[in-house]
Amino acid sequence: MKKNIITSLLLGLVALSASAQQDPLLSQYMFNHLLINPGYAGSKDYAMTTLLYRNQWVKLDGAPKTVVASIHSPVFKSRKVGLGLTLMNDRIGISNRTNIMVDYAYHIPIKNNLKIAIGIKAGLMNQTAKLSDAVIIDPNDKIYQGGSLSRLNPNIGAGAYLYSKKFYLGFSVPGFLSYDPSRPISIDGSLRNVPAYVRHYWITSGAALEVSPDFVVRPSVMFRYSDNTPLQADLNCNTLIKQFLWLGATFRTGDQNAGMPESIIAIAQIQLNKQFRIGYSYDFTTTLLNNYSNGSHEIMLGYDFGYDIMKLRSPRYF
């Protein structure tokens, strides 16, 4: 099968380790902070499950596709302990990464409804590259003639999450352990490399402003940094209408020298009932990629277990 040029370029990144593997940057993370901060585990009064699918840069062969499933819940009567589980698969060209991470958080009341949670996460990360799918210039190059690369690594992360019913501030490092691509592995008698994984630092903050009982505005920001990449930032604003419909937009920074965002994201989420919700986002790419792709689509499904309407006197917006 004929492969797109982007697949060849991605292969070069994998085989030569010219670039480090990055955590996927999702568009609807503000509806489930567990994806980036283990301190979020158990911050609700019920068990929260989420399934997300992201198709990035539609029309480009080998473009990223990401699937994430997660669940978290408070445990014990004190509700001071939260547990979570996250499964993720991220495919880019011939490169594939699968993560399974377990989250633990301890929630400490400060005053009134303000709490701080300290969380840790641990798990495994499996990275593979299927060389048989590569487009190569030299068909006699034995390095790329079939086979695959694979590496299984443990990882740990941590985060802090300060929150109330109408405010939050978080700092997290989802993966502390970075892996150097200069350390090759042996495949079929040949030493080959797999992509590096680099450490990411996240800062998130937001607030909920009740304009009226039927209209809530939720501004938020996100900053993400990793070695050898520029600081990324999101400016978000979501509105909740009649406790039923979320509508929002995100401005995501890109080339700082260009003075314009990398993408503009439209977000909509419907709260079908007190437990079930469905969300959709579309990324309008503002870089040169817009000439070759149809943007990015993301779908999120969520269901909450153990939701007690009688005990929920005032809603949580995060």
Image (cartoon, rainbow, N blue to C red):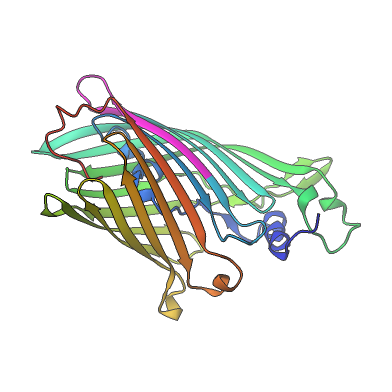
Find out whether residue 53 is within the magenta segment.
no
In the image, is 185 to the left or to the right of 244?
Answer: right
Relative vertical location of residue 17 with respect to residue 115 in this rendering, above or below: below
Q: Between 196 and 29, which is closer to the camera in this rendering?
A: 29
In the image, is 129 to the left or to the right of 43?
Answer: right
| Rendered location of residue 150, percent (x, y) | 69, 40
Image quadrant for the C terminus?
A: top left
| Observer able to see residue 191 | yes
Q: Between 192 and 278, which is closer to the camera in this rendering?
A: 278
Which span of residues is magenta-colored?
Answer: 67-82
Q: Between 86 and 13, which is closer to the camera in this rendering?
A: 86
**Residue in view at x 42 percent, y 59 percent:** 225
Specify the farthest residue to the top. Answer: 77
**Residue in view at x 21 percent, y 46 percent:** 243
- Judged by its main secondary structure, the magenta piece is strand
| Rendered location of residue 124, percent (x, y) | 54, 34
In the image, is 139 to the left or to the right of 45?
Answer: right
Image quadrant for the N terminus?
A: bottom right
**Residue in view at x 28 percent, y 50 percent:** 245
